[in-house]
Image: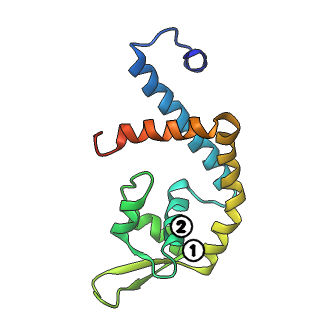
């Protein structure tokens, strides 16, 4: 094990199996991110922006406050407000004042945003197919279990 990683990093040995696993996880995450970035670049969309649109699609038509969007993001973004600003300028999202609390704004995906997410589905699905081609369903479940062991409630 580790031959592909050794070649990729031009490294002959690792400090131990945990070190090797951490490096493998970083390289694999970069592999997925890079493919998603390429897929989204044609639409001038970052992965973080796509993630916000995906979250808002799930909350359509009600939307979410900024804090809830931030909580649900796959990767924590330091400035969710700026992400929403960019989406709003492109007409992909809109902000409205909450009817129950006028101090709170709620962000909703627009029809244009919904259409874009729908057009991106085949592109994003193609990235997912890389997993299906390289991992069995059993291996994918095991990978998910191992990842959740790292970042889940028992992890920090």
Q: Which residue is pictured at 57% across the width and 35% down the height? A: 139
Residue density around tag 1, few if under 14, some if 14–19, many if 20 or more, within 10 Å:
many
Residue 101 lies, with reference to residue 21, above or below; the image says: below
Identified at 45% across, 53% down, the residue is 74
The alpha-carbon separation of the residues under discs 1 and 2 comes to 8 Å
* Res 16 quadrant in image: top left
128 is higher (above) or lower (below) than 49:
above
Near mark 2 (Cα within 10 A), the count class, few <14, some 14-19 or many ≥20, is many
71 lies left or right of 123:
left
Q: Are marks 1 and 2 in contact (CB under 8 Å)?
A: yes
Q: Give the numbered dot on residue 151.
A: none
- Residue labelled with disc 2: 53
Side of 104 relative to 142 (left or right): left
In the rendered image, which quarter is residue 100 located in? bottom left
Across and down, in percent, residue 125 comes to 68, 53
**Does the image show residue 31?**
no
Question: Which residue matches tag 1?
Answer: 92
- At 50% across and 57% down in the image, what residue appears? 48
Frontmost residue, 41 versus 115: 115
Residue 113 in view in this figure: yes
Q: Secondary structure at mark 1?
A: loop
Residue 85: image location, x then y, percent: 46, 71
């Amino acid at each position: 094990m580790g031959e592909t990683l050794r070649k990729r990093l031009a490294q002959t040995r690792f400090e131990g199996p945990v070190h090797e696993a951490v490096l493998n996880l970083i390289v694999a995450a970069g592999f997925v991110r890079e493919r998603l970035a390429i897929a989204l670049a044609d639409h001038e969309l970052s992965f973080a922006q796509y993630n916000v649109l995906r979250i808002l699609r799930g909350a359509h038509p009600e939307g979410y406050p900024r804090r809830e969007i931030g909580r649900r993001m796959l990767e924590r973004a330091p400035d969710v407000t700026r992400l929403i600003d960019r989406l709003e300028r492109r007409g992909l999202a809109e902000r409205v004042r909450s009817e129950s609390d006028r101090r709170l704004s709620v962000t909703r995906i627009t029809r244009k945003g919904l259409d874009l997410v729908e057009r991106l589905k085949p592109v994003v699905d193609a990235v997912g197919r890389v997993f299906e081609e390289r991992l069995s369903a059993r291996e994918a479940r095991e990978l998910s279990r191992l990842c959740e062991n790292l970042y889940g409630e028992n992890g920090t």
